[in-house]
Amino acid sequence: MLPYHTLQEAEISLGRNLTFAETLWFKYSAQKSDYILYCHNTLFLFIFYTLFPIPFVILELLGSKKIDKYKLQPKFKNSFSDMMECYKKVMWTFVYAVGPLQVLSYPVIKWIGIRTSLPLPSGTEVFWQLVVYVVVEDYANYWLHRLMHSPWGYNKIHRVHHEYTAPIGFAAPYAHWAEIIILGLASFLGPLMVPGHMLTFWLWFILRQLEAIETHSGYEFPWSPSKLIPFYGGAVYHDYHHYVGGKSQSNFASVFTYCDYIYGTDKGYRYQKNVFEKQQREIKHPQSTVFDMIKVSNIENSNPVYIV
């Protein structure tokens, strides 16, 4: 809770007038405890997880040729009831796993110094903190995800997430409750190392969830703003991991591709991508695009795989 009762007190303490954003923050947060503000993060997870996959649900249900050319596995179609069933299961997991984790972790948040006070952080501060958060989480997530593909980790925990060989947006957090907690801890490492403002903390978890939904959407759009991010994997990169399934030893990264490249766990993906590009050159179809599906042999198992 802010230690000011009025805007004038806040301005006197800061020695200047509040910015527009700081005034809004004061009016919203002044009478709310830090604990209540922290619990907003759980609310945002519910809201954004519910709303952001809806456009992908609509695209899946429409299923026209114009849309399907951007679908990574066009032969897989999910009904509305199938997608709603996935949504309900994830929401229950949020209730008995994510919610309690968020609530019980509050003492840690206070201990590391996530603040709700004024002044608000600058845009530059927020940007660089988010950069640290995503890099730290991506590296930790890579190794935790790779551990999940050990025989014990996969059979006992991670196989639930791989029930979707053709991912959909609602399936981004579809997983065993233990995996939700384990991989969720990776998302806390950045704020633990570089604590910032509560607004930055909220923004980090919202962006991370939106990224996960996009990479599980099953669609790859050439105009996506995420394509401007260096080393970003995207939906096509993660879709390969899901298609190969439990035997996959490729594409463990959650956001970027550099860990897979450094540790050699993208060889299957790169091999088949090269095969696809070579076949495109040989058939010399000037109108063909990266979204044309070419069936090639899978070097990781005996099943065929469609590479985009």
Image (cartoon, grey):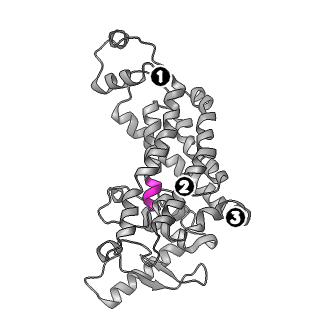
The kind of secondary structure element at disc 3 is loop
- Tell me the crowding category of disc 1: few under 14, some 14 to 19, or many 20 or more residues within 10 angstroms, Cα based: few
Tell me which label, 1 or 3, sits earlier in the chain: 1
Q: Amino acid at mark 1?
A: Lys
Task: Single out the mark in the foreground, 1 or 2.
Answer: 2
**Circle 2 Cα neighbour tier, 10 Å, few/some/many (<14 / 14–19 / ≥20):** few
Give the spatial CA distance, label 1 vs label 2: 31 Å
Of the residues shown, which amino acid type is indicated by label 2? Lys
- Where is mark 3, residue-wise? 150
Secondary-structure class at tag 1 = loop
Q: Nearer the viewer, residue 16 or 207?
A: 207
Give the spatial CA distance, label 1 vs label 3. 45 Å
Residue 58 point in image, percent of width and height: 36, 63
Q: Is residue 148 magenta?
A: no
Q: What percent of the width, then of the height, locates residue 179?
A: 64, 53
Q: Position of residue 29 (x, y in %)?
A: 42, 23
Q: Which residue is mark 2?
A: 88
> Taking 202 as reference, is 115 above or below it?
above
The amino acid at mark 3 is Ser
Please report the residue visible at 46 percent of the width from the left and 69 percent of the height from the top: 79
Q: Is residue 205 visible?
A: no
What's the magenta region?
211-215
Q: Residue furthest right?
A: 152
Disc assigned to residue 32? 1
